[in-house]
Image (cartoon, grey):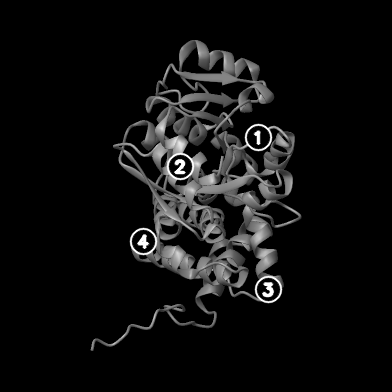
Amino acid sequence: MTSSDTAHSLTMKSSAITVLGGGSFGTALADIAARKGHTVRQWMRSEEQAAQMNRTHVNQRYLPEYPVSEKILALSDLDRAVENADVIFVAIPSKAFRSVVTRLKGKVGNALVVSTTKGVEAGTFALMTEILHEEIPGARIGVLSGPNLAKEIMARHITATVIASEDENLCQAVQDILHCDYFRVYSNYDRYGVELGGALKNIYAIVAGLATALGMGDNTRSMLITRGLAEMSRFAVKMGANPMTFLGLAGVGDLIVTCESKLSRNFRVGYALGEGKSLKDAEAELGQVAEGINTLALVRDKALELGVYMPIVDGLYAIIMEGKDIKQVTSTMMMREQKTDVEFSVKAEKPL
């Protein structure tokens, strides 16, 4: 069967969907797919968590307020979870991503493998789909990213996301599987740009939370978000991404919601830091992974290596990692060299 035939068959029947990860976003995707009539298995590390979800049909740890479809089968056996899957969504924190997907070698068959993790691997600066290519050679791979707060998805608030892959048929299959009246899926071929946007925006969400806790005004927060977008696109272009990708849902869309919503894990960590709490206490209070903390030092080091001007990243690093005074860092940032507002543009053609 060709890749085109495979994609077509996925849209014409109930597909076997596997979600790896017992967190909030993985659960939201599992719920969407199950309610659309697909066979859904969700893998969780904890046998106790899986048993509880099968019994109560609620993810008590991450989404206790929302019942999920009774058609979701939660499993702690990875091999059983991925057996004969048509599509595998990988929703594992970046720190544990490689250790899980390396166990998939020789087990995915013709399944489409889609990462939903927004982060960068320490030591290699590899994005999650790059890890998938290394650990599952030959697999058809994509990334799902966008302004997607899991609690709002579960509450059926209208939401949009992006499926990105060079494989057009993969994009079409994922669109058909997940699209519904409250979850819209757009496609993009700039997989690297979409994935990098999802990782970078977490840093600026921490900054936004910090600024909000300190009582900074709307002008300040607007400046931070906008200049954050400029830094993201400047860094991404140096890494080989298309700057226009950052004008879409996976760029500015994800940046806005992560920097403005108190449901955002990274915003909440930044807010706690702004209240004077230690990083350890802030993360303990959150109870979930804030990917921006993991990403911050990695991006700062890579930016220095590449010579990319990223003053907000530098400032946040100085505050969190070096213990510098917030007011002093802010003052120093404001006195830095002023750059142009819009660095990337498309030259318009004059009308005939």
Q: Rounded to the nearest whole Å, what is the CA distance between mark 2 and mark 3?
A: 37 Å
Residue 306, disc: 3
Residue highlighted by disc 4: 217
Label 4's element? loop
Q: Rounded to the nearest whole Å, what is the CA distance between mark 4 and mark 3?
A: 33 Å
Residue highlighted by disc 2: 173
Do the residues bearing badges 1 and 3 touch, measured as CB atoms within 8 Å? no
Residue 194 coordinates in the image, percent (x, y): 51, 57
Residue highlighted by disc 1: 108
Residue shown at the point (73%, 49%) measured from the top left: 134
Q: Is residue 267 left or right of residue 182?
A: right
Earlier residue among tags 1 and 2: 1
Q: Could you tell me the amino acid type at mark 3?
A: Leu
Q: Quadrant of the N terminus?
A: top right
Do the residues bearing badges 2 and 4 touch, measured as CB atoms within 8 Å? no
Residue shown at the point (70%, 65%) measured from the top left: 301
Q: Say which of 337 and 196 sits in front.
A: 196
Q: Could you tell me the amino acid type at mark 2?
A: Ala
Q: Nearer the viewer, mark 1 or mark 3?
A: 1
Q: Could you tell me the amino acid type at mark 4?
A: Gly
| Residue 323 seen in the figure | no
Label 2's element? helix
Residue 72's place in the image compared with 245, above or below, is: above
Q: Say which of 293 and 144 sits in front.
A: 144
Q: Nearer the viewer, mark 4 or mark 3?
A: 3
Residue shown at the point (67%, 21%) measured from the top left: 77
Outermost residue, right direction? 123
Q: Quadrant of the C terminus?
A: bottom left
Q: Rounded to the nearest whole Å, what is the CA distance between mark 4 and mark 1?
A: 50 Å
Do the residues bearing badges 4 and 1 touch, measured as CB atoms within 8 Å? no
Based on the displayed image, in which of its 4 quarters is residue 67 positioned?
Answer: top left
Q: Could you tell me the amino acid type at mark 1?
A: Val
